[in-house]
Image (cartoon, rainbow, N blue to C red):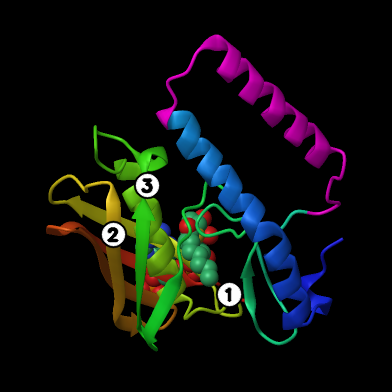
Amino acid sequence: MWDFAEMSSDEVASLRARYEPLTQSIRELIDAALHVDADNQVVDQAKAQIDAAAELLRAHPASTRQGMALTPEGESIPWDNLGNGIRNPLAPPLVVEHTGPTSARIDVELGAAYEGPPGHVHGGYCALVLDQILGEVASRGSIETVAATGTISLRYLRPTKLGRLHVEAEIQRTEGRKIFITGHIADEDGTTVTAEGLFIVLRQ
Ligand SMILES: CCCCCCCC(=O)SCCNC(=O)CCNC(=O)[C@H](O)C(C)(C)COP(=O)(O)OP(=O)(O)OC[C@H]1O[C@@H](n2cnc3c(N)ncnc32)[C@H](O)[C@@H]1OP(=O)(O)O
């Protein structure tokens, strides 16, 4: 159904405009469900409406699924992927901004769905966000030169508050296919988690 290798950027933009609002609505649904305090009637009514929406969507299944893909124009499409998939409500809306050929940043708001310790981001999610940005910088924003996580080491300096977060990553050095890269997450009070990764550029 979706063959991104055959699509122009305009066609991808139109698909994005169709599905991104659905993904955002499901994220808002998750957030609402995490904050609700209602009686049986309200919860039963909401459940029936959600079940009906799921049934409607299931009646139109896609013939293929793709984590990420590349258009002929070289545009990388993160489609269903957990890190930043346009269609994956479990993916926080991570927008990686490349600040140079070897560095990038993300500014993201992580709410209740990402909670681990009370009021703080789950440590596994911190790892996911750092793995994602380190991987994207190591791959230089293109899936033509994908670099996979070989080894990643995280140091949790203190709990990361839920809310607005700033994330950065930068390549330190490269040896053949090995890319040594560091990164960190900061909340409103400063750096909370640092990362050191060794990413390996995949053989074609
Ligand atoms: C744009 C997209 C961004 C996406 C970001 C998301 C990042 C991810 O989550 S990727 C998923 C998690 N990672 C994986 O699944 C990777 C699984 N592992 C593999 O596929 C392979 O082991 C792989 C590709 C890492 C290395 O395999 P291969 O290419 O055969 O490496 P190989 O030729 O044996 O070794 C090359 C060099 O790397 C070193 N190396 C290999 N594996 C590792 C490792 N895990 N850690 C550290 N060093 C390693 C070797 O020692 C060797 O070093 P040297 O050249 O000095 O002798």
Q: CA distance from mark 3 to mark 2?
A: 12 Å
Residue 88 visible to the viewer: no
Q: CA distance from mark 3 to mark 1?
A: 28 Å
Tell me which segment is drawn in magenta.
Answer: 35-64
Q: Position of residue 94 (x, y in %)?
A: 45, 62
* Residue labelled with disc 1: 203
Left or right, residue 118 beside residue 76: left
* Residue labelled with disc 3: 125
The residue mark sitting in front, 2 or 1, is 2
Residue farthest along the top direction in this orientation: 40
The residue mark sitting in front, 3 or 1, is 3
Residue 182 visible to the viewer: yes
Q: Tell me if residue 187 comes above or below residue 3 in the rendering.
A: above
Q: Position of residue 46 (x, y in %)?
A: 62, 25
Note whether ligand 1 is within 8 Å of mark 1. Answer: yes
In the drawing, what numbered circle is on residue 165?
2
Q: Residue type at mark 1?
A: Arg
The residue sitting at 82% across, 37% down in the picture is: 56
The residue mark sitting in front, 3 or 2, is 2
